[in-house]
Image (cartoon, rainbow, N blue to C red):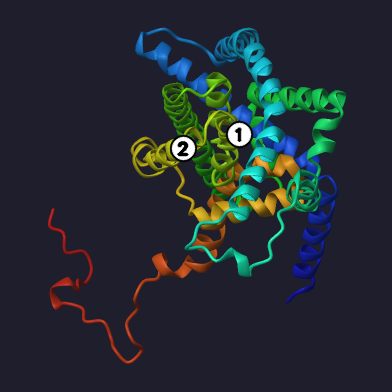
Amino acid sequence: MKFGNWVGLFCLIISLIILWQFRQIVLLIFTSVVLSIALNSLVRWLQDFGKQRKITISRSRAVPISLGLVFLFSLLFLGLVLPPFLSQFQKLIALVPIAINKVLELLDLFFENPPGWLPLDQIELELPNLTEITQQFGPFAQGILGNFFDFFGNSLTVLLQILLILIFAVMFLANPLAYRKLFLTLFPSFYRRRTDEILDRCELALISWMRGICINSLFVSICCGVGLLFIGIPFVFTHALLAAVFNFMPNIGPAASVVFPLSVALLESPWQAIAVIVLYIIVQNLESYWFSPMIMQKQVSLLPAATLTAQIFFATFFGFLGLVLALPLAVVTKTWIEEAWIKDVLDRDKDTSIPTPKPTQEPQIPLESITVGNTHDS
């Protein structure tokens, strides 16, 4: 290994250490990039919409129109959706500890009067109370979620982080090519064209994921809302909206979204609780094996185990924000590994290799192809 390679490796290690020290800022910038990509797709849609109707919409006009539409939608959401959601959610949070205590009481009653086929007399089992469960679960939750309470504990910090994300997103949206060229200068000159192609693939993968997950979340929300309304569970609007939000986090999200309607159902009737569990299992299976493959034909395919591993990894090292961004981070990481490592390094000679004749063999040249001088007749 040459001296220049050692210097490059040393600089790479130093850069990674610096990025690790500022990982929260890097995650905020990544969030801004994802948001700017979503807004940029809306800008391109407006321009294509104008071309279909023979109306020229320049980017300088499409960008403020897109931002205005997003701002209008945000105002409608804050005015119409958020107030009833917060009102129901506060009541729902107060019911969760009561439901847990009821579950523990039912389990105590079950173990005190077990059925004849279950020999619990030979087993000494003491169930913990709610306080003991909280104490035992606390360190695990803190290890997984990291700085969850630090992230949401200071409202001013949260507002500043959201403002920073929005400012970066608007700046990236206003002039994306300039920031893209600036990012490409970090790579060697011989690999910049290839890096630009990988960035295109990452953008397409993220757009595909965002479109698919939004449609999937809407499908899960409608199905859960209709099912809970049919079962007779209170706070249907809040449960449906939570199901849509938690659907953005596969594996962990669906399991977390069923906790709230299940807690309310346990206070009403055990049969309603069973119906809620069956409903959510049916909805998740429909979404996973029927609706998602039909909608997300171009979505980046991630194995369930790989998705769960990425969620645990990013949540452990980057905290709550890493858990929220685990899937887009996994999508981008998967694209870079496939393109930059597998195709450009491991499979570099696989597709470009041309079989050459053996040294002992000489190429056979037809006599008709041998010409002397100029044989063209004028």
Vertical placement of residue 169 versus 128, above or below: above
Residue 121 at x, y = what percent?
61, 66
Q: Earlier in the sequence, mark 1 or mark 2?
A: 1
Q: Residues within 10 Å of mark 1 (few under 14, many from 20)?
A: many
Does 302 sit left or right of 238 as displayed? left
User: Residue 231: percent from the left, percent from the top?
Assistant: 44, 26
> In the rendered image of this protein, does residue 354 appear above or below residue 322?
below
Q: Quadrant of residue 22?
A: top right
| Residue linked to disc 1 | 263
Return the residue at label 2: 280
Q: Quadrant of residue 54?
A: top left
Give the residue drawn at x 56%, y 43%: 255
Where is residue 186 drawn, in percent x and y?
Answer: 71, 48
> At label 2, which amino acid type do we have?
Tyr
Residue depicted at x 63% and y 12%: 84
Q: Is residue 377 above or below residue 349?
A: above
| Residue type (three-letter) at the residue carrying disc 1 | Ser
